[in-house]
Image (cartoon, helix red, strand yellow):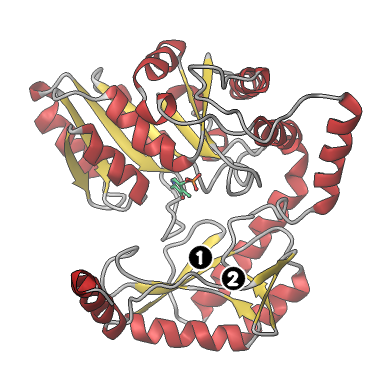
Amino acid sequence: MRAIYEKYAEDLDALKVSGNLRELPSGQHDGKWIINYGNRMLNLSSNDYLGLASNMELLHEFYDRVQSSGEQLPMSSSSSRLLTGNFRVYDTLEERLAAMYGRESALVLSSGYHMNTGILPALCDRNILILADKLVHASLIDGIRLSGARCIRYRHQDYSQLEKLIEKEHSDCDRIIIVTESIFSMDGDTAPLQRLVEIKRRCGKVMLYVDEAHAVGVRGERGLGLAEECGCIGDIDLLCGTFGKALASVGAYVICDSIIKEYLVNRMRTLIFTTAMPPVNVAWTLFVMERLHSFKDRRERLLRHSERLRKVLHDKGSETPSASHIIPLIIGPATDTVIKAEDMRRKGFYVLPIRPPTVPEGTSRLRFSLTADITDEDMDRLCDSL
Ligand SMILES: *Cc1c(COP(=O)(O)O)cnc(C)c1O
């Protein structure tokens, strides 16, 4: 090793000692299974919540349609959307999204990470105050940092603290942006969106930014997310979601008023200075979105499995904060969590330990993430082996 890298080696050693060293996992996919060292395990760490990414029938239907339509769908857009990368399929997807949500506009982005690191820096200046839930996703934290705006993180889901902060701070700033997830990535609990809308309505300076990465596809009658379920799609200024999880594609979107979209097109660096997504991926996203309403049986099965696993954990005395298909079993120390995860894998369940810095120190956990292609028999085995 070169002497100049010594510091990195020391840091890695320290991570190893504390049980927090990460490695890129190996393993092959076979539908809902993962095969690793000859061991076939049910994948309980996937974000393919509806089981669409592993659905080859759906994929073949897409390929057949592309072939028979003769549509030109290159594997690269070769440019930013603001130059020559704005293929027609982008506009079609955005028009469809705006119509499905019943809002003025939608803007499609390359990933959730681009979305969350781009929107806040574009919309913020020094006179804006961001109020963000303590547990928002790392991409939102990075967006907040890049925005240069003043930010206060309120205690996770503590809305009376949020109200007090608005009361105290609103006269010292031009606008306030409340930032939250709808289903939180690590706890699997859900934000009361109606309550947030009421809080926003009480002060004319407040905008609401909701990241639905884990809820889109899964929640709501048509799968549009928790905002659909809560009946408040029209009340969220920046209603964000990603295509890479339940929707089995790649990219992200924000549903908003036209003025906001126009502003983002002019100011959002993660939109302007990056090559647009390949048209073929955008076409696939459109294909999935058009069928989203029809996956209701999958949403219902996922709901059933989730309720069952939460009840089993509860009956075993392990409280979980979850109110969704993301169900953490909080163990505490990182090393114990790693051992428990290995035990589950030996029993045929691929579940990963989640450790700091992803979650706070002392709250390491197994994170079960259920999908709609898990059968009742799979659930029987899982519940028995806990
Ligand atoms: C996964 C995730 C993202 C990032 O989305 P990508 O499309 O994977 O970049 C953003 N926000 C939340 C809450 C997420 O869970």
Q: Nearer the viewer, mark 1 or mark 2?
A: 1
Q: Residue 92's spot in the image, x, y percent?
A: 67, 19
Residue occupying the point 39% across, 72% down: 22
* 348 relative to 355 in the view: left or right: right
Q: CA distance from mark 1 to mark 2?
A: 8 Å
User: In this orientation, which residue lies closer to the viewer: 275 or 374?
Assistant: 275
The correct choice, above or below, for 214 with respect to 239 in the image is: below
- Left or right: 205, with 334 as reference point: left
Task: Tell me which amino acid carries mark 1.
Answer: Ile
Check contact, mark 1 vs mark 2: CB within 8 A: yes
Mark 2, residues whose alpha carbon is within 10 Å: few (<14), some, or many (≥20)?
A: many
The amino acid pointed to by label 2 is Leu
On the image, the x and y values in percent for residue 377 come to 77, 75
Under tag 2, what secondary structure? Answer: helix
Pick the residue in front: 288 or 317: 288
Q: Label 1's element?
A: strand
Q: Which residue is label 1 attached to?
A: 327
Q: Residue at x 63, y 68 (%)?
A: 308
- Residue at the spot 17% in from the left edge and 42% down from the top edge: 152
Q: Which mark is residue 309?
A: 2
Q: 29 or 33, which lies in front?
A: 29
Q: Is residue 198 visible?
A: no
Q: Is residue 89 above or below residue 2?
A: above
Q: Residue furthest front?
A: 2
Q: Position of residue 3 (x, y in %)?
A: 19, 74
Crowd tier of the residue under label 1, counting other residues whose Cα lies within 10 Å: few below 14, some 14–19, many 20 or above: many
